[in-house]
Image (cartoon, grey):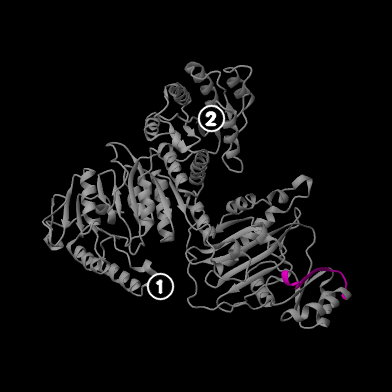
Amino acid sequence: MLRLERLLRPKSIAVIGGGSFAPNVVKQSLKMGFAGDIWPVHPKRDEVEGVKAYASVADLPGAPDAVFIGVNRFATIDIVRELSERGAGGAICFASGFLEAGADDDNGERLQAELVAAAGSMPIIGPNCYGLINYADGALLWPDQHGGQRLEPGTRGVAIITQSSNIACNITMQQRGLPIAFLMTAGNQAQTGLSEMALGLIEDDRVSCLGLHIEGFDKVDGFERLAARARELNKPIVAMKVGRSEQARAATVSHTASLAGTDASSDAFLKRLGIARVNSIPSLLETLKLLHAFGPLPGYTLSSMSCSGGEASVMADSAEGRKVRFPKLTEEHWARVKSTLGSFVAVANPLDYHTFIWNNEPAMTDTFTAMVSGGFDLNMLVLDFPRGDRCSDADWWPTMRAFESALRTNKARGAIVASMLENVTEAHAAELFKRGVVPLQGIVEAMDAAEAAAFIGEAWARLASGAIGSNASSAAGAGRNTPDEAEAKALLRSAGLAVPQGARAASVAEAVAAAEKLGFPVALKALGVAHKSELGAVKLNLKSAEEVRATAEALLPLGTGLYVERMVEGGVAELIVGVTRDALFGPVMTVGTGGVLVELLKDSATLLLPASREEVEAALKSLRLYPLLDGYRGRAKADVSAAVDAILAISRFVQERAGTIEELDVNPLIVCGEGKGAWIADALLVTNDGEAATAVSHEKKVAVSAEG
């Protein structure tokens, strides 16, 4: 944080380069009223934008706090070295053509290494980035025009970091009334990562909350520190993490990787840190507005008022399928609201108060005060202002004042929600903020913002469940191994997992003998075969020696042998429990609806390990399958507690072997009725060191009982 202090909040700025970009940095800082020194550096010019220029870094009157370097990539390295030796506070590296150039430029990786070495302990941002706008101090290390304005003295604004300079430019042009204190671009993060930049920004007292546009995480522990500090400072974070549509995933032989993927890991990581995630730039900005005004919300309950049944219906529909909700009014609350309205008005939440009281400020104040008195976490008033060039908004302000009074009386949080972006102007938004009301533009975006703010409130109320990233390393260069089930059984059994009796069979006769010894019914599978159901390599509920014999004759040619095991009976539901190794986060667990339709249904939740019992329970309850586990429509309830025990046991098994396990795919985990346990019906294990690498059993009880 202190490392970036001079760069983020400079008292002197040096600007190096010609062309149009570097002089524009001087121009923008002057235009914004920067009170510190500005030192252009140009070998052939006496002045830039009317400011005295210096021929070289060596000629500068002192070591600058912040530097914008707008020269080519080769010259950038030399200048960074000079600045570091001179004791500069930090630099923005505008040039591209470093590591981000990828395979198209063989010099990129080498040049980036040289750049980092040249910087030494001096922080550099980029390369390949536009830089920094400090609206709090008027300090712009920014080579282009922008649409923002200086933060008013004594006020606060949001900080935003994006890995895209063009998105940053676009954000400065927003007309939503969002006050911005800092806007920063990260570039390719050669030396200073996004998490360190964010830590530096949230330490500023003038920053209320933080918005991130993330293409990739720089460091797990860096984001952990950021999230912890954000909670300490009561400065919530919302992120737009790109990558949901990612197509390319690592080749794998398990179901789990097709469900998890990098994006699911990122989502689980952000959830654990208490960083809300949204999916669009408008939702990011609207969430920042809500967080700027109120911080995290304590819960998910909403109220809505409008003078239109159509608007009330749209509001209700927009909450469908979300955690935010419009709870039904209690009888007492209903009567209180009803007493302020006529007999023709149906009282509900969302409330259509009709137009009977429109422009009657005392009457609207009574109704709004009664509605807001319900103790909702956020109160919404749907209000689209008329366009100013053709209409008058005079009749809208009595409604606004009535809402403002209702919020003040009840000490409640409130937001004006415009159904369309353009129906709240920038001037309207600024006025609403001054009145203590958040202007939210777009109904869907308003719901996204409320849900994000409530998520942060919920997450901050939870205790941290453990460190992340401690298992992120893997054996370097180790190969992937896939031995068969029998070898894996020994590993599972040695770990204390309850494994039922089963036997390898090399012939039809051995399969029949094993089945008779185990007792019917049994399952029979071909060994060494992944995705057995698709290949017909598993047969269940074989009840006689004749059935085993006929089945063994058919399955024996499919694999490397046969496996015979006792059947599980009384199953209520099937789950998938899988673990893959993420290069950044370490072991990542997927829990979801299992069985042969796992990829089709895609009903899953992702957890980072270690995971607490509460997190596992929450993951199960988030599944569409969960009502079946909970006794859907009078059916038998499943042994959910045993399922949780099984998942935690699998988690411990993986964590204890974090350096060797690459994938573990349990599908299905059969959850039986209450008191009957949870059993692994099929599992595939891939390790990187040859240590028992494939488990494909039909019946491994994971929940360890007192009998062992």
Residue at numbered disc 2: 375
Drawn side of residue 382 relative to residue 14, left or right: right
Tell me, for residue 362, which label it has, or none. none
Q: Residue 240: horizontal and vertical position, in percent?
A: 46, 51
Q: Residue at x 65, y 70 (%)?
A: 684
Q: Residues within 10 Å of mark 2 (few under 14, many from 20)?
A: some
Front residue of this view, candidates 350 and 408: 350
Residue at numbered disc 1: 103
Front residue of this view, candidates 630 and 464: 630
| Quadrant occupied by the C terminus | bottom right
Q: Amino acid at mark 2?
A: Gly
Q: Is residue 495 above or below residue 634?
A: below
Q: Residue 98: horizontal and vertical position, in percent?
A: 33, 68
Q: CA distance from mark 1 to mark 2?
A: 58 Å
Name the secondary structure under disc 1: helix
Do the CB atoms of the residues marked 1 and 2 lie less than 8 Å apart? no
Front residue of this view, candidates 16 and 221: 16
Q: Residue at x 60, y 73 (%)?
A: 686
Magenta run includes residue 637 = no
Per the rendered image, the range of residues in magenta is 534-545
Q: Residue 302: horizontal and vertical position, in percent?
A: 55, 34
Q: Amino acid at mark 1?
A: Ala
